Structure formats: structure tokens, C-alpha cells
Image (cartoon, grey):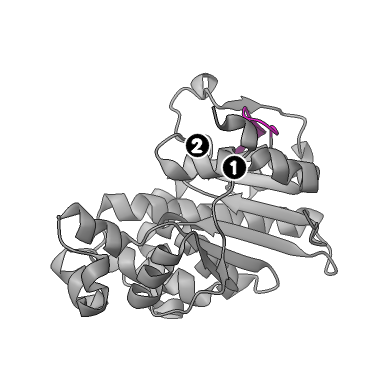
Amino acid sequence: MVKLEIDYLFETSWEVCNKVGGIYTVLSTKAKTVVQTYKDQYICIGPDLSEDHNKSRDFEEDKTLFKNWVVQASKEGLRVRIGRWKIQGNPVVILVDFTPFFEKKNEILTQFWLENKLDSINGQWDYVEPALFGYASAKVIESFYSYYVVASDKIVAHFHEWMTGTGVLYLHNNLPQIATIFTTHATALGRCIAGNNLPLYSKLKEYNPLETAEKFHLQSKHSLEMLAAQLSDSFTTVSNITKEECESFLQKPLDVMAINGFENDIVP
């Protein structure tokens, strides 16, 4: 594996230390190799969802990690916990409490409309909550960058799925010197079409993305995913068939095909 000359690699997902679906498996089974390459320069960012912080099964807090920055972040209104993800490789993890941004959601989403034309007007809570997490994650990266990084450092921030798309938009608007990667594993629109038992790949070119998103009340998620794909420095997906879906629905040619990888020793 060739090591890219970067100083920090951030990887943000709703499924960091939060076992929901397949992306948890993708991230957790590649972590050992990534940590071997980047050591503690590789930092995962996930949502702090546990009401009882002592019961985060996949997370072990370590208050010695970046402790001075944590104090500064708190002064900036950012609530974070830092520790290790209890998987192979034990990568550094920042869990972000994004609930303080609830009261500012209208102001935050309005700004994204003004700067990027992000359509959040029809977004329900299952859209607003992850949108605020993506925003909070980018604010955390911005704070870390301001505290530790110098102008010559090379920083990459990798975001997975539409749930973290506001992170891509925020860094694009405010810290363009940080390179962003956006990966979709399947589009929100494609999942919805398949979930409603409609043909997807056999009739891919027949769907008008905006009309279909409106039909299924998916305008906000689709808008966020499309903008994240278009505004990221590198847009990736995980298979040729998903590539076709992305290019049809998100109106952005793929930059890189990033096939999912995993450690050999997890296979029976």
C-alpha cells in the first residue's frame, strides 16, 4: 500500500461506533490497514448517540488524546469525546454531540440555501438530524485544523453517504484548502425506488431524478446528496452498478471507483 503524503485523514460516517448497517462493516474491517499506514493521523468521526456515555460498547474514551484541543473545542461550543474504536487497529475516534445545534437549525440550513442552494424545506427529522451531524463534524474538523495544523500541512476529509453531506458543503464553503472525498454506497433515490418494489437498474435512464425525488418526498435528501457529490474534490462509489446509479441520479461523473476492501482474517 502506497502512503499518500498527508498529515491528517478524517473519516466521517453516521456508522462510526454506531452499528446500523453495511457501512459499519466497510469502515471497521479496513481500519487495521489504514492505521498501519497513517497511525494516529487517521481519525474517525461519528455521532455521540449514547444517552449513557459509559455504555458505548464500541468506544473507549481516552482523555489524554488531544486533551488541550478538547478544552478549546468546548470553549467554541463543540461537545466531543475522544477515544478508540474497539475494533482491529483501534483507530482514534471523535464522537460528536450535535444536539447543541438543534436550536440553530433554521439559521444553519438557511445559510446552506444561500451559499449552495441546498433544498432543506421539505426535510423531516430523519433529514435534519444527520444534516446537523455532518455540519457539526465539519465544525470539529475546522476547530482541530485551527488548533494543530499549519499552512503547509495536507488534510483530507472523507465523508460517507448523504447523512454527512453538509460536512462536504461546509468545508467547501469555509476551508477549501482541506481536500474532501464524498462516497455514496447507494443513492437515497435508488434505495427508495428499490424499497418501493419498482424496477431500478433495468429502467435507470427512465427516471427523472427531481420528479422522482418529489414523488417520494425525498427532495431534501436528494438535494444534499447531489450537492455533496458535485462539490467534493473527489466523488467515489463502490461498484460499477452503483456508478451507473450515481451518474444518472446525481448528475456528476465518478472520479474514483473505490471497491470495498476488508481484512482477509475476517473471512471464515
Return the residue nearer the eye: 76 or 250.
250
Across and down, in percent, residue 117 comes to 38, 78
Disc 2 from disc 1: Cα separation: 25 Å
Return the residue nearer the eye: 146 or 91.
91
Relative vertical location of residue 52 with respect to residue 238 in this rendering, above or below: above
Return the residue nearer the eye: 221 or 129.
221
Across and down, in percent, residue 32 comes to 69, 38
Residue sitting at the far top: 54
Quarter of the figure with the C terminus: top right
Left or right for 158, reference 56: right
**Could you say which quadrant of the image residue 3 lies in?**
bottom right
Q: Which residues are magenta?
A: 79-90
Residue at the image point whose x is 27% and y is 67% from the top: 201
Residue position for label 2: 48
Q: Are marks 2 and 1 in contact (CB under 8 Å)?
A: no
**Could you say which quadrant of the image residue 109 lies in?**
bottom left
Q: Nearer the viewer, mark 2 or mark 1?
A: 1
Left or right for 113, reference 74: left
Label 1 is placed on what type of residue?
Phe
Relative vertical location of residue 213 with respect to residue 82 in this rendering, above or below: below
| Badge number at residue 169 | none
Across and down, in percent, residue 256 comes to 58, 69
Residue position for label 1: 262
Q: Is residue 89 magenta?
A: yes
